[in-house]
């Protein structure tokens, strides 16, 4: 079955929630670039990399708004985003154009998890080795500058290798979903996930979120064990408690992505009919929610950024002096009564 009632709802979700997340991340980029203190610039570079990755990943979501149909060793895509309005007279070129956009979304989605893993390990090392001299800035910049180009080279190569003639793609899709081939949909497929060029790409897209959660739990356990082992001042305890909360809250993003992986497995192994189509539409939605996690967690737990946002709110409240609820909120934010 090609069309389903959940299609329009999930496309609307991509365009509304996704756009809000995109704007939030753009605002966070501005805050990081303009208001980061010198003492936190190294760690801010990690946050900035995650935030830029989320923004670029959303561009892929906005262009494709894809429904993913796992079928044995194949992945079928139905594109409902802006890319389907491009190259109206050439289905093959349009479909490949959409696939390239979706590949960009996927590679930035995976990059987000890999940078998060690096972020967790980095913070754990800083906390558990307070006396050890680490050239933090060189370490962070070197890893980001070395890994990111390799990441993009591999995933763009994998996307290029997935491109096949439209006749072959349509023939393979028709074995499972003939309605799609004979509709006016913009569709494409990776027709062999076991191909050497696709194996790592596929494994990482499904498992990177789960690995990020596992690393989060291990790093959090190590930090808690370290902080309980030594006597500390109240200020240091509060700092470590705050960092533990950051670990926990930033795991929400990978958790959302893990739900997407679970939905993928349900479609692949245990669903049929209308339920299967609903799950196919839901596969990519947790990643859209994931985009909003980073700006919220960052603003809440990093004091310089939180103070900037509170200052913005106070300036907005000052423009509307007759709004008592807003005034109360602004007073509570500054600690006044």
Image (cartoon, rainbow, N blue to C red):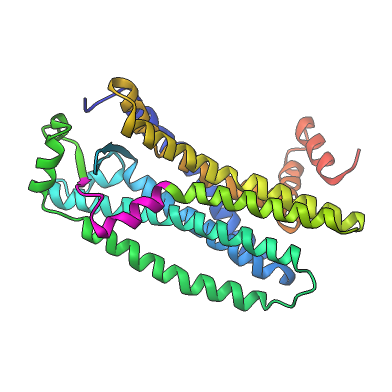
Q: Which residues are magenta?
A: 189-206
User: Is any atom of residue 244 visible in this view?
Assistant: yes
Residue at horizontal 19%, vertical 56%? 163
Front-most of residues 309 and 46: 46
Task: Give above or below for 210 relative to 198.
Answer: above
Question: Is residue 272 inside the magenta stretch?
Answer: no
Position of 239 with respect to 251 (left or right) is right
Location of the N terminus by quadrant is: top left
Q: Quadrant of residue 175?
A: top left
- Secondary structure, magenta segment, majority class: helix
Residue at 65%, 65% (x, y): give it: 43
Asked if residue 190 is among those painted magenta in the image, a careful observer would answer yes
- Find residue 14 and report its image quarter: top left
Q: How many marks?
A: 0
Relative to 167, 198 lies left or right: right
Quadrant of the rendering where the C terminus is positioned:
top right
The reply, left or right, for residue 17 in relation to residue 223 is: left
Query: Whole-percent x and y of residue 2?
Result: 22, 28
Where is residue 61 drawn, in percent x and y?
Answer: 38, 46
């Amino acid at each position: 079955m090609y069309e389903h009632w959940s299609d329009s709802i999930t496309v609307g979700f991509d365009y509304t929630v996704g756009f809000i997340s995109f704007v939030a991340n753009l605002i966070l980029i501005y805050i990081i670039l303009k208001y980061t203190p010198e003492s936190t610039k190294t760690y801010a570079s990690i946050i900035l990399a995650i935030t830029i990755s989320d923004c670029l990943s959303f561009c892929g979501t906005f262009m494709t708004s894809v429904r993913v149909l796992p079928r044995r060793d194949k992945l079928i895509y139905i594109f409902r985003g802006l890319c389907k309005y491009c190259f109206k007279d050439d289905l093959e070129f349009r479909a490949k154009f959409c696939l390239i956009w979706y590949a960009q979304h996927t590679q930035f989605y995976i990059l987000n998890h890999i940078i998060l893993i690096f972020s967790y390990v980095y913070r754990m090392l800083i906390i558990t080795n307070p006396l050890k001299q680490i050239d933090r800035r060189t370490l962070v910049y070197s890893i980001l500058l070395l890994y990111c180009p390799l990441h993009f080279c591999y995933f763009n190569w994998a996307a290029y290798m997935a491109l096949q003639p439209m006749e072959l793609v349509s023939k393979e899709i028709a074995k499972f979903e003939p309605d799609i081939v004979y509709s006016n949909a913009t569709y494409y497929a990776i027709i062999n996930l076991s191909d050497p060029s696709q194996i790592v790409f596929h494994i990482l897209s499904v498992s990177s979120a789960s690995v990020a959660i596992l690393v989060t739990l291990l790093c959090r356990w190590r930090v808690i064990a370290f902080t309980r082992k030594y006597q500390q001042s109240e200020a240091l305890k509060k700092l470590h408690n705050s960092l533990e909360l950051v670990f926990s809250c930033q795991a929400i993003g990978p958790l959302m992505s893990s739900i997407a992986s679970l939905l993928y497995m349900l479609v692949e192994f245990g669903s049929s009919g209308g339920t299967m189509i609903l799950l196919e539409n839901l596969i990519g939605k947790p990643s859209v929610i994931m985009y909003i996690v980073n700006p919220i967690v960052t603003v809440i737990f990093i004091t310089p950024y939180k103070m900037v946002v509170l200052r913005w709110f106070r300036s907005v409240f000052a423009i509307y002096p007759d709004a008592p609820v807003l005034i109360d909120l602004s007073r509570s934010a500054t600690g006044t009564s």
